[in-house]
Amino acid sequence: MNPKGRKVNRCTFHSPVIRLAPSARTFKSSERAPRAISFGVKTMDSVKSTPDGFPSALISPAAERNSAAILEVLRAHLPVQGRVLEIAAGSGQHAALFATALPGLDWTPSDPSAEARASIEAWRMKAGAANLRPAQAVDMLDDASWPSEPLDAIICINMIHISPWSAAQGLMRLAERSLIRPGGLLYLYGPYREAEVPLAPSNAAFDDSLKARDPAWGLRDRGEVETLARSHGLALTLRRAMPANNLSLIFRRI
């Protein structure tokens, strides 16, 4: 992204997904398997039709595994009421679960991928949660797509390591612009490099696989993410270890 925020490449970030019949729910996938990314090329994840009346609904095995652990953190730290924007919402499973579990929050999922937004809408219809809004086409590489209204929280799960650094920079600019009230929350989830913690072999292998697909991708250094956040008026207030060598990071508007 250039300094004016003009889009250079459109990125589509969403969890590896398959359309599943009930008998296919044993599909195996790494917790941190790359989200299907589109740079004008075919995504790597196969899909299957689901017979349950929601043919556009996609299922991410990683989302199925990490949802409960993430919800535990969000329930403890999100406000009881407020406006939440989910970035790179992918299949929409997280949005459906979290909005249902946290009914006081006005939850808006977003994703630049039309396929992802169709899946999110299917999950929204399936969940029937009154506080779950239709998906928006928000792209971290295109600030013209960003919402203008103030937010109480921004949620971003498994994106910044499977996208160029400019997407993380865009995310922080969005947070600075939208989290206008002190204490406004930015939640990040995923694997990170940490100077004080040896890198797990599985994370090292995952990092290598990401960089082999695109040199601009890869696990981010937590310290560099903190520095970027501070430059946009955000302070790290929580680091919590999560299953499968992931972290939950919470930043608050100063």
Image (tube, rainbow, N blue to C red):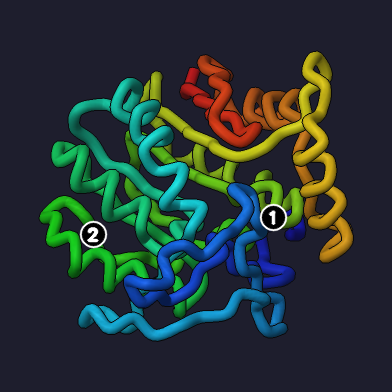
Instruction: Name the secondary structure under disc 2.
Output: loop
Position of 226 compared to 72: left or right?
right
Identify the mark at residue 118; answer none if there is no mark.
none
Whether 212 is drawn above or below 167: the answer is: below
Give the x, y percent position of residue 121.
29, 71
State the image coordinates of residue 250 (x, y, percent, origin top left). 50, 25
- What separation in Å lies between label 1 and label 2 (alpha carbons)? 26 Å
Which of the labelled discs sits on residue 133, or is there none?
2
- Asked where in the image residue 39 lies, by quadrant, the reply is bottom right
Q: Is residue 20 left or right of residue 158?
A: left
> Measured along the vertical axis of the image, is residue 127 above or below residue 99?
below
Residue at 21 percent of width and 55 percent of height: 132
Q: Nearer the viewer, mark 1 or mark 2?
A: 1
Instruction: Tell me residue 92's x, y (percent).
Output: 37, 61
- Which residue appears at 51% of the width and 68% of the height? 17
Residue drawn 61% across and 75% down?
Answer: 45
Q: Looking at this view, is 25 or 184 the one in front?
A: 25
**Amino acid at the residue labelled 2:** Arg
Question: Could you tell me the amino acid type at mark 1?
Answer: Ile
Q: Which residue is tagged 1? A: 162
Which corner quadrant of the image does residue 81 belong to?
A: top left
The image shows residue 105, relative to residue 240, as above or below, that is below
Q: Is residue 145 visible?
A: no
Most foreground residue, 52 or 170 = 52
